[in-house]
Amino acid sequence: MFKVPFLDLRVSDEKERAEIHAALEKILIHGKILLGPEVEAFESEAAAWLGVKYSIGCNSGSDALTIALRALNIGPGDEVIIPSLSFIATANAVAVVGAEPVFADIGNDLNISVESARKLINSNTKAILPVHWAGHMCDISKLIELCDENGIHLIEDASQAFDAEYNGKKAGTFGTIGCFSMNCMKVFSSLGEAGLIVTNDEKFKDKCTTLRYHGLVNREYCVQIAQNSRLDTFQAAVLSVRLKTLNQVISKRRENSAYLNDRLGKYVSIPIEKEGYKHVYYTYTIQCKQRDELMQHLLNCGIETKIQHPLLLPMHPVYQNKAKGEWVAGIELIKNVLCLPANEKVSQDQLKYVADSIVNFYERD
Ligand SMILES: *Cc1c(COP(=O)(O)O)cnc(C)c1O
């Protein structure tokens, strides 16, 4: 049977493989293994790409978030408003620094609802931490306004949205600090774990750099509690290699998504790219009726799909008894979401097969 995997992490492009081997060879020879020259090189390339003054590589998107929160002195007694739909890391980062995540509802685009966030602000609120869901930015201009009105920080979780844009400006560069994950599953990905913190403020650049390695200044004086979150030199080298082809990867994802939009728009709610925004399609997420039946049907056809996510953050066992906020719309919305394979490695034949199989499902008697 024809098979369509949701994600294929093999490095099948020979040129890319050769470049990665060459990059590793270089590191083996120079021997500067920890925070080697590749880390700094990647940091400058990423900052230039994003159009931001400073970028600090770290070991994961999760740690990028905790470092950002600590750099802003957010901790016990503080509240941080986050969307009720995200990967668990967004909530855990807030909890790990001792602050309380407050869950805002989401809109039909699955991004944070600004109106919901507005209602949740109180004197303990220190920041809003929106996620640019699935590769499409949230309503960032309204959030900036809201944060400015209330004198609180905006921290962006742009883990799924490297290179996404609003009015030509890149995701992650709007707030006080922007956080990215480049783990191997993201659109812009390493071959393991990696993260990035960006800011235009020199003071926060210095703080984040200190927090990346145990809060140490000059490697000997610890000024703030933190962990080891250094970016691995080999992953930095891989990221520099992959940054060169990122435009092609994203173009292919956008092409695949446009094809599915054309084929599926009649049957399901297709992902929306709002005027002025650039969607990078971390996932191609539809909203549909009979989601579970469709998922099973596609599985029977050999097509792997994913529910991102079956639980809202406040529904996880660790949060459910004490979660603050509101998420009534979110509860309904997540019953209908389904992510289809549409990444750059999905072939034209596979894509057509996915579309045909969905059309068959809705056209059957
Ligand atoms: C992937 C992801 C993270 C966590 O990144 P890691 O690098 O896996 O730690 C955080 N937030 C969101 C929205 C993500 O998608």
Image: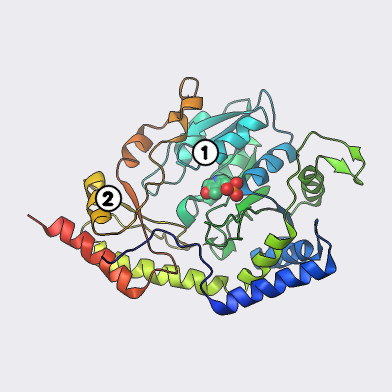
Q: Is residue 305 visible?
A: yes
Label 1: how many Cα within 10 Å (few below 14, some 14–19, many 20+) = some
Seen from the viewer's position, the closer of residues 275 and 61 is 61
Asked where in the image residue 188 lies, by quadrant, the reply is bottom right
Picture coordinates of residue 199 (x, y %)? 71, 53
Label 2 residue SS: helix
Q: What amino acid type should be assigned to the residue bearing mark 2?
A: Met
* Location of the C terminus (image quadrant): bottom left
Residue under label 1: 88
**For the residues marked 2 and 1, what is the alpha-carbon distance in whole angstroms?**
23 Å
Residue 204 versus residue 96 in the image, above or below: below
Picture coordinates of residue 293 (x, y %)? 21, 47
* Location of the N terminus (image quadrant): bottom left
Seen from the viewer's position, the closer of residues 116 and 359 is 359
Picture coordinates of residue 125 (x, y %)? 61, 30
Q: How is the image coloured?
A: rainbow
Marked residue nearer the N-terminal end (2 or 1): 1
Q: Determine the residue positioned at 78% across, 67% down.
A: 28
For this orientation, the residue located farthest to the left is 365
Residue under label 2: 295
Q: What amino acid type should be assigned to the residue bearing mark 1?
A: Ile
Residue 146 versus residue 321 in the image, above or below: below
Describe residue 211's horizontal placement relative to residue 182 as left or right.
Answer: right
